[in-house]
């Protein structure tokens, strides 16, 4: 996630109700499978997409959207997921990223951060929330095709 990052959007979907979570999860997994990600990473990806889109449905107070795309940066290539809403926002979101605060592996903000290679949250009360997550594909070497 720097100035030399290339990013190509593949899909953009609304996130407003629980069925949107399921669709986002399916589309993200499908795009990653087409890119040749190994199965263990597809599962991680599906988990973080579910968690972040579910947060919009449960906490934002309005609909948001998910963007799914290819990302490349300095010899690496993978999938970028951006989940954004203009809802309630979070005061000091970093307090939810601390290790061990929430139990289950992969659950919530802290768990999702551990499951991806790049994780950035921007949020403030009344200004909405944007989460950017990158997962690198170990099978690819920095070329977007
Ligand atoms: N998109 C969002 N909009 C508003 N608040 C959010 C959003 N995502 C997370 N939050 C806030 O951050 C807290 C922590 O989120 P999370 O780690 O996913 O745990 P959980 O969803 O189980 O409460 C939530 O309880 C909520 O208060
Ligand atoms: Mg949550």
Image (cartoon, rainbow, N blue to C red):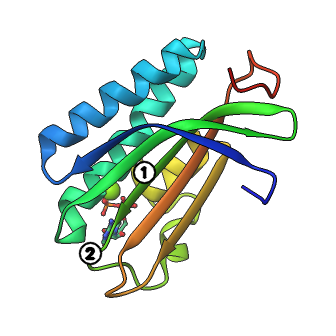
Q: Position of residue 111 (x, y in %)?
A: 50, 49
> Which quadrant of the picture is home to ligand 1?
bottom left
The reply to whether the residue tagged 1 has its Cβ within 8 angstroms of ligand 1 is no
- CA neighbours of label 1 inside 10 A, class few (<14), some (14 to 19), many (20+): few
The reply to whether the residue tagged 2 has its Cβ within 8 angstroms of ligand 1 is yes
The residue beneath circle 1 is 103
For residue 122, side relative to residue 4 (left or right): left
Label 1's element? loop
- Quarter holding residue 2: bottom right
Q: CA distance from mark 1 to mark 2?
A: 26 Å
Residue 106 appears anywhere in the view = no
The quarter of the image holding the C terminus is top right
Q: Position of residue 59 (x, y in %)?
A: 23, 67
Which one is in front, 63 or 57?
63
Say how many tags the image has. Answer: 2
- CA neighbours of label 2 inside 10 A, class few (<14), some (14 to 19), many (20+): many
For residue 113, side relative to residue 29 (left or right): right
The answer to whether residue 6 is above or below residue 98 is above
For residue 144, side relative to residue 33 (left or right): right
Q: Nearer the viewer, mark 1 or mark 2?
A: 2
- Quarter holding residue 29: top left
Which one is in front, 42 or 86?
86
Which one is in front, 7 or 129?
7
Q: Are marks 1 and 2 in contact (CB under 8 Å)?
A: no
The residue beneath circle 2 is 87
Upstream in the sequence, badge 1 or badge 2?
A: 2
Residue 12 appears anywhere in the view = yes
């Amino acid at each position: 996630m720097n100035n030399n990052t290339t990013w190509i959007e593949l899909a953009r979907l609304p996130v407003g109700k629980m069925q949107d979570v399921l669709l986002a999860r399916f589309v993200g997994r499908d795009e990653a499978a087409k890119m040749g990600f190994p199965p263990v990473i597809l599962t991680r990806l599906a988990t973080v997409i579910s968690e972040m889109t579910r947060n919009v449905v449960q906490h934002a107070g309005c609909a948001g959207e998910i963007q799914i795309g290819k990302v490349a940066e300095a010899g690496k290539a993978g999938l970028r997921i951006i989940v954004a809403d203009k809802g309630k926002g979070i005061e000091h979101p970093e307090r939810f990223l601390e290790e061990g605060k929430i139990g289950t592996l992969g659950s919530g903000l802290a768990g999702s951060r551990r499951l991806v290679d790049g994780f950035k949250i921007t949020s403030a009360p009344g200004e909405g929330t944007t989460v950017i997550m990158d997962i690198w594909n170990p099978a690819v070497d920095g070329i977007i095709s």
